[in-house]
């Protein structure tokens, strides 16, 4: 399996092009609050994280974005390769409408955004790849297996599922992540950080080949990327 954890793609004309693409997407949102949120998301999931995910996505074919929110990352990956078809799902109707409007404003036509909760998607078509960025730890623990099984069933053989999430250890990084998550979602939402060995074992039970690596950050944030390939 490929792996990019060095940040080596962050220099040169292509890297500058990708960063300009990010700036263009953020500017397309009309709400100052949403723009600030988008800027924060692109700080937390920085360029070399996007590169680490993006290297596993095909340049053409159907790609599933679970928990797409305002459509940030669907628009990012769709805008890089026009032959990709990005399909985003989120449980918030207002965010879906915003994603559709911004896609139209940017002229990015190879996206679709639909209402759907990550734990209860109804996927009738297959995908060449899928990703979930900081979604698993927001799902009720009892729904995680069903969610992963759904994605596995929807992927074509050989397809990749990329999970960027929060590691359980070390504890001080976990508490830092929890502070940020609570600031975003409040105190009522269930948050479960899975130990990597436990989530990796579950993914393998479901039928994925799994490679795990950490994503380095200047913040004390325990980013972890699960690269899962369907047999």
Image (cartoon, rainbow, N blue to C red):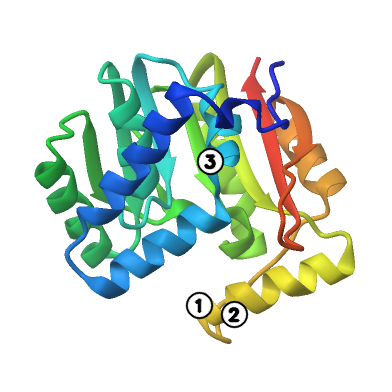
Left or right, 121 with respect to 219, comes to left
Q: Secondary structure at mark 1?
A: helix
Left or right, 19 with respect to 93, comes to right
The CA span between labels 1 and 2 is: 5 Å
Q: Secondary structure at mark 3?
A: helix
Q: Residues within 10 Å of mark 3 (few under 14, many from 20)?
A: some
Residue for badge 2: 182
Q: Position of residue 2 (x, y in %)?
A: 69, 17
Left or right, 109 with respect to 165, comes to left
Number of the front mark, 3 or 1: 3
Instruction: Determine whether 46 is above or below 76 in the image.
Output: below
Instruction: Determine whether 130 is above or below 190 in the image.
Output: above
The CA span between labels 2 and 3 is: 24 Å
Q: Position of residue 11 (x, y in %)?
A: 56, 28
The residue depicted at 41 percent of the width and 39 percent of the height is 19
Residue 185 is tagged as 1
- The tag earlier along the polypeptide, 2 or 3, is 3
Confirm whether residue 75 shows in the render.
yes
């Amino acid at each position: 399996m490929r792996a990019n954890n060095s940040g080596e793609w962050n220099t040169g004309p292509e890297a500058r092009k990708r960063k300009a693409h990010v700036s263009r997407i953020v500017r397309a949102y009309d709400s100052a609050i949403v723009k600030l949120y988008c800027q924060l998301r692109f700080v937390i999931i920085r360029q070399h994280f996007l590169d680490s995910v993006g290297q596993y996505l095909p340049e053409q074919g159907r790609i599933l974005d679970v928990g797409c929110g305002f459509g940030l990352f669907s628009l990012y990956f769709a805008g890089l390769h026009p032959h990709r078809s990005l399909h985003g799902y989120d449980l918030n109707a207002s965010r879906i409408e915003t994603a559709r409007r911004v896609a139209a404003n940017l002229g990015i036509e190879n996206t679709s955004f639909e209402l759907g909760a990550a734990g209860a998607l109804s996927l009738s078509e297959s995908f060449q790849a899928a990703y979930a960025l900081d979604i698993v730890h927001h799902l009720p623990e009892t729904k995680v297996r069903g969610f992963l099984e759904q994605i596995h069933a929807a992927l074509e053989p050989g397809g990749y599922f990329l999970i960027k999430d929060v590691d359980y250890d070390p504890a001080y990084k976990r508490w830092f992540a929890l502070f940020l998550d609570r600031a975003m979602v409040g105190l009522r939402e269930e948050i479960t950080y899975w130990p990597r060995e436990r989530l990796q074992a579950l993914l393998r039970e479901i039928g994925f080949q799994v490679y795990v690596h950490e994503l380095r950050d200047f913040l004390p944030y325990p980013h972890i990327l699960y690269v899962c390939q369907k047999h």
